[in-house]
Amino acid sequence: MTSSQDPNRVIIFDTTLRDGEQSPGASMNLEEKLRIAQVLEEMGVDVIEAGFPAASRGDFEAVQAIARTITKATVCGLARATKGDIEQVAEAIRPAARGRIHTFISTSPLHMKYKLDMSPDQVYERVIDSVRMARRFTDDVEWSCEDGSRSEHDFLCRCVEAAIAAGATTINVPDTVGYAIPDEFAAIITMLKNRVPNIDQAVISVHCHNDLGLGVANSLAAVKAGARQIECTINGLGERAGNAAMEEIVMALKTRHDNLPFFTAVTSEHIMRASRLVSATTGFVVQPNKAIVGANAFAHESGIHQDGMLKHAGTYEIMTPESVGLSTSKLVLGKHSGRHAFREKLKELSFELGENAFEDAFDRFKALADRKKEVFDEDIVALVDDQIGRAHDRIKLVSLEIECGTRASSAKLVLDVDGEERSCEQTGDGPVDSAFRCIKKLFETAARLRLYQVHAVTGGTDAQAEVTVRLEEHGRTVNGQGADTDTVVASVKAYLNALNKLLVKRQKTAPAALSA
Ligand code: KIV
Ligand code: ZN
């Protein structure tokens, strides 16, 4: 028996790029999605839900690009129960080594009546038609009963049985509105196992939202009851309060194997890297006390705890920082470190750069080490992320001079726009405002600033600032990031990064009746 056939193996289905991207403000461009998909594959995720192709041309192209690139994980696309949606997913996943169509329809009385305006019998027929249609394109078809946890049990059993008979190989039960309580949700899985005659012909999956903070608890309770696929996202990203957090599920199964005798194929040491990448890409900062990936998750501040830790780490630590990819020797490189040490560090942090990109990163590392006494892992991650995010920029920062203090502030900015240098000077309400006024003067757009956020990558007054700027133009939202030891420079880089993303044509329109 291979490990994937082991009855206790739990399939990890990541939906950061689909449900996660549906969080307002968390939109990602094609390159960013590709990078995240690659990291997810490297960490051992089984299924990557890459998007919702019918939502927009951009989503379609992202799913297709991921399908072309990913070789080990299954690449999945979401479709409503319509011919058009299913055909679009089929086309987008066509290049995939392993492709899945995930089609869904609501089964709760509330959704059928008010959202779909369909009778239960009409929904039942649609379940059969949609799954059959999807099966024409692939053998791997997942069917979801949206708002499953609030559906009537008899009707739910009827639909699940029909979906399996029509060819669904995975049956996903979403707690769409995060309403379920663990024992009640587990009972739904037990009920399906007991009452649906053909249930053994499909994998039972769960998809739990976190509106009551129970997404992970509900998912684990469902696994105990027999579910063998969990849908989740990095950092718990997702609609409203988000989805069950993948890092919490993976570490709960690993740490409490005594109580939860199940396992996944995820290499937990990759967790921090994925978490940082998703946070930097979306601008959704991870709260410091967030389980597993928060900055304080492994910090021991109180004297009693520190004393206990020194005597035996197990006193206050139920898992090691290394097991989630945090290195204990945080001080890594300095200005005397050479290429070899830098290359090794990049490898340790799971970055693979081509020769030109490596040389560029090394120069930037040297410049940083000149300005900053101690260079930590977080600094290198921010530096490389910043560089990768900037590779195809049309607007580049050439120079910035700032005057500020207790009196007026002014900025002198030079930009390179498509190879042509443009400069200007502006005064403003503080240095950041002055610099942003220069950008607006040099490159006029209808874009409006929706979020400006700064956080220090490490401690100390010489820490790099990591800035997120969210811009909105004609209903499109993009997040730009910038990192630098100078907060104003980091802010300008973040603003330019967002503008550059707006320049990449990508229309995203919200599809009708999607409350996924
Ligand atoms: O929350 C939900 O019900 C969903 C489905 C489309 C799986 O996201
Ligand atoms: Zn969802």
Image (cartoon, grey):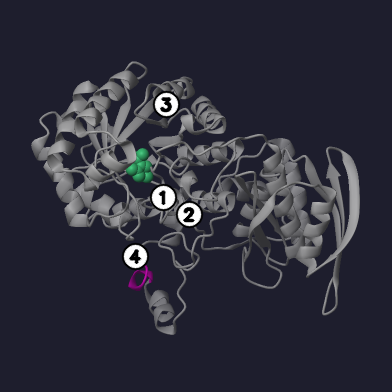
Amino acid type, residue under disc 3 in the picture: Asp
Q: Position of residue 160 (x, y in %)?
A: 19, 33
Inter-mark Cα distance, 1 to 2? 7 Å
Q: Which residue is mark 1?
A: 268
Q: Is residue 112 above or below residue 270?
A: above
Q: Is residue 300 above or below residue 385?
A: below
Amino acid type, residue under disc 2 in the picture: Gly
Amino acid type, residue under disc 1 in the picture: Ser
| 4 or 1: tag closer to the N-terminus | 1
Inter-mark Cα distance, 2 to 3? 39 Å
| 1 or 3: tag closer to the N-terminus | 3
Q: Which residue is mark 3?
A: 85
- Nearer the observer: mark 3 or 4; the answer is 3
Is residue 402 in sight in this rendering?
no
Q: Which residue is mark 4?
A: 318
Quadrant of the image containing the N terminus:
top left
Between 470 and 116, the one lying in front of the other is: 116
